[in-house]
Amino acid sequence: MKFKAKFFNGSLAFVIFIVLNSGLAFGEENKPSSEINKEKFKYHSTTALSLVMTKGNTENLSLSFETDHNFEFSKNKINFKGRAIKATSNSATKTEMYYAHLKYDRNLSSRAYLLGFSRFERNKQAGYDYRVALSFGGGCNWIKRKNTQLSSEAAIGWNNEDTTRRIKLNNINNPQAVIEKTMSAAFVSALMVHRWIYQINDSARIHLQETIFINLEDLLDYRTNSYAAVIASISKYFALNTSCQVIFERKPVPGYRHTDLYLLSSFVVKL
C-alpha cells in the first residue's frame, strides 16, 4: 500500500508538472515572436570621445576613446569595456594608457548575482607595462528602483603585473624559466566595488563609483579608484558626460607618484 501511495503521488506530481509546462509553453506560443525575442536578448552600448586633462605622473591635455557594450539574455549579463588615452608632443609620448575588461554576471535572484571578471591595464607613465587580473565573486543590488540604484561587488582573484620590468630572463628560449618567473610575479588579490546611480530627471543622472583593490600578500599594497560623473542626454542617441577619476596607489612603482587625476569632457553615442 505504501508503494502504491508513493507511486500514485509520484504519478500525480508528474502529471501536474506536464500540465504546468504545457500551459507555459502554450502561453509562450501565444506571445508575439518580437516580444519573446525581446525577453530573451537585450543589447545596449555607449561610445565616447573625450577631451582629457591628466595630472599626476603625467600632466597633459589629450583625447580619449571609450566603448562600453552590454549583452543581457535570460539570467546572464556580459559587459565589455575598453579605453585608450594617448598623446604625443614633439614625437615623444606624453600619455599612453590602455584599459579593457570583460565581465560576466549570473543572476541568482532579483538582488544577488555571481560574477567573473578579467582585466588588462597598461600605463607606462605610471611605471607599469601591463597588469592582468582574473577574479571571481558575487554582487548585491541593495536598492534597485526607477531613479536610484545602489550595488556592491566583492571578488578574489589572481594578478600578474609588470613582468617585462620585473622578470630578468637569462635565456628567453627556456619556456620553463618563463613560466617560473611569471608565476613568481603573480599574487592573490581582493576587489570591492560600490556603485550608486541616481536619475535626476528623464535626461540627467549622477554616477558615483568606488573601487578598492588589495594585494592579499601585502595588505599595505592597496589601491583606490574613485569615479564621479554627471551624464546629460541631449537626444535618444546622444549625451554629454563630465567626469572625474582619481586613482591612488599606496605602493606605486618606485620612482612614480601615488595619485593620478583624470578630468574628462565627453560626447557619447548611445545604442
Image (cartoon, rainbow, N blue to C red):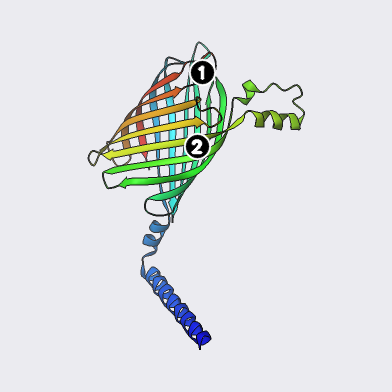
Judge left or right: residue 189 versus residue 110. right
Q: Which quadrant, please, contains the C terminus?
A: top left
> Disc 2 residue type?
His
> Disc 1 residue type?
Gln
Judge left or right: residue 25 versus residue 221. left
Q: Residue at x 45, y 78 (%)?
A: 13
Q: Residue furthest bottom?
A: 1
Judge left or right: residue 175 versus residue 266. right
Q: Quadrant of residue 244?
A: top left
Q: Residue at x 48, y 82 (%)?
A: 11
Give the labeled residue for mark 2.
101
Mark drawn on residue 125: 1
Q: Is label 1 in a helix, a strand or a loop? A: helix
Q: Residue at x 50, y 37 (%)?
A: 101
Please provide percent x and percent y for residue 33: 39, 63
Please tell me how crowded label 1 is: few (under 14), some (14-19), or many (20+) other residues with Cα within 10 Å: some
